[in-house]
Amino acid sequence: MSMLAGATLLASTLLGANPAQSAEAAAQPVDVPAEFGTDWHDPVTAAPAVTRPVGSTSCEVTVAEAQFRDFTPYEGAYEPPRGCGAGWSKVVLRMEGRVKGRQYDRLGYLHIGGVEVLRTSTPQPSPDGISWSVEKDVTRYSDTLSRAQPVEMLIGNVVNDTYTGILDVKVTLTFYPGTPVAKDTPDRVLTLQDGTLTTPRNSERIVAEVYATGSGGGCEEYWYLTVPDSAPYSCKATDGPYREVQIKVDGQLAGIAAPFPTVWTGGWSNPFLWYVIPGPRAFDIKPIEYDLTPFAGLLNDGRPHDVEVSVVGVPEGQAGWSSPVNVLVWQDTERARVTGRLTAHHAGDLDNSSTYTPGSADEQHRLDTGAAHRLTVAGYVDTSHGRVVTTVGRSLTNTSVHRWTDGENTDGLAATWTDAENVTVDGRGPARATRTQRTYTMDGTTTLGAGDRLRTVLALGDREAVTETFAGRRTAWSWLDDAYTGDATYTANVPRDQRHAVGTTSERYRLFGSAGCHDRSLVTVQGVLTEDRDGC
């Protein structure tokens, strides 16, 4: 891959963070090393912890406990908890990991009953060893968790004389008895069977979730940097860097989405950026969600239907993307059959263009990319509580400027992706609407200078604004801004103890809205956590 002319690029992965130290603990005097040594602070993120019911009893079940040395999956069996009732107000997954020595970042997943409940990546360890954890609200998978199920987990790894880090992990589920929130917890959780989906005939709401990740250490790990064949750069893609994750039902476009530009903990040629603070979403991959309710009338005929996920822009025949699919279904318990029809389908033309400007002795090579796409679908279902019409509109844009020098010793990108979605549900009574505006940003440069000193300066942004209305009046809202910045330098192409690395990283995670406030800031210097501040 490029991004590092002359430096050894690190492969990719997915996974967790330890609960952060308190502000008081972080404020203790520390001896900041002149370079990253044999140990550094355990990974930590500024994201909020999963909330749990107050004063409630709970039951815990161990789902997986394994050491990953190669690409052999862990296989086990899950049994529902005893003593926590038949329904749960919340289910929290927790993964704890330990690793020491030398290891790349690695990508992992956890399947329960074939349903993907976690996609994650790992941090890179210190010689003395680190530990980390990831928590996730998995209440939406209660249908799957209500029965005994097979378990499969894999964090593909390579252990040899050079890469010595064995990934030691444990995954538990904690159950809190009670009644789940009906609008958030589906009645059924389905997976595709040989690329087909068969829904219950009384489905009244259908949502697909896709854990789409570009990874594997090749060019699709850095898809946002690829260039057309005409440009002199190491990573090629015929149509440039634009990527779009599409889902089709029986060959008809049913949903579009912008993939999040995840950076794993070896990304941008500089692991010293990520030893303590990972990039947004790197340890807990969020699935892309598609509301397929307008297609419910078609899907409810009792027959299997083709469901296909593809990534626009990937060169033909090139691997590098994974896109497992879960389908969440809410049923009309008062009817054995819910009928309906797709009433509108408007797919705009995909506008995707990249303009290459050759470099010179004084100017860098430059690629300017602009892309946009729109899709609107609508349909109705006739339920026991009347006809319900669902309209889903989604609009995507991407702009980026990629600059690099001959030899790629300097390589930089400034990019923005937007993904705006409107879902309106109109039935008996006033209409309900949910508007979601997602914005992802990346602004960074890697430079290989004199003495093989490699410096990476990078800023990443993950923003989302959600507004819910009923009869035109706002009923709920939230605003998320997860901002990461890093600046790290080391000597490339030498043993670890000669890298003389220095680095400063920070993250501020703000989440405001009708549900409350979270505002946490972290700062690290040379692997030491120097600031942990709560702004609420």
Image (cartoon, rainbow, N blue to C red):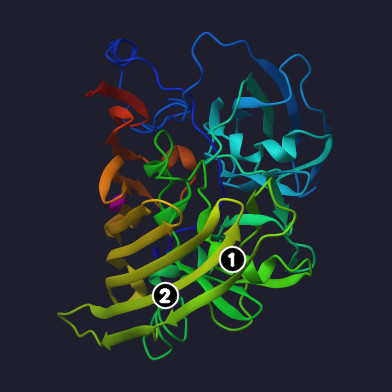
Image quadrant holding the C terminus, namely: top left
What residue is shown with label 1?
Answer: 321
Q: Residue furthest toward the bottom? A: 230
Pick whichever, 498 or 467, lies toward us: 467
Amino acid type at mark 1: Trp
What residue is shown with label 2?
Answer: 375
Residue at position x 47%, y 26% in the image: 42
Residue at position x 43%, y 29% in the image: 44
Q: Quadrant of residue 399?
A: bottom left
Residue at position x 51%, y 18% in the image: 53
Residue 536: in magenta span: no
Residues in magenta?
A: 456-463
Q: Is residue 198 left or right of residue 435?
A: right
State how far apart marks 2 and 1 are (Cα): 23 Å
Residue 459: in magenta span: yes
Q: Classify 47 as above or below 498.
A: above
Q: Residue furthest toward the left? A: 362
Residues marked 2 and 1 touching at CB (< 8 Å): no
The disc label shown at residue 202, or none: none
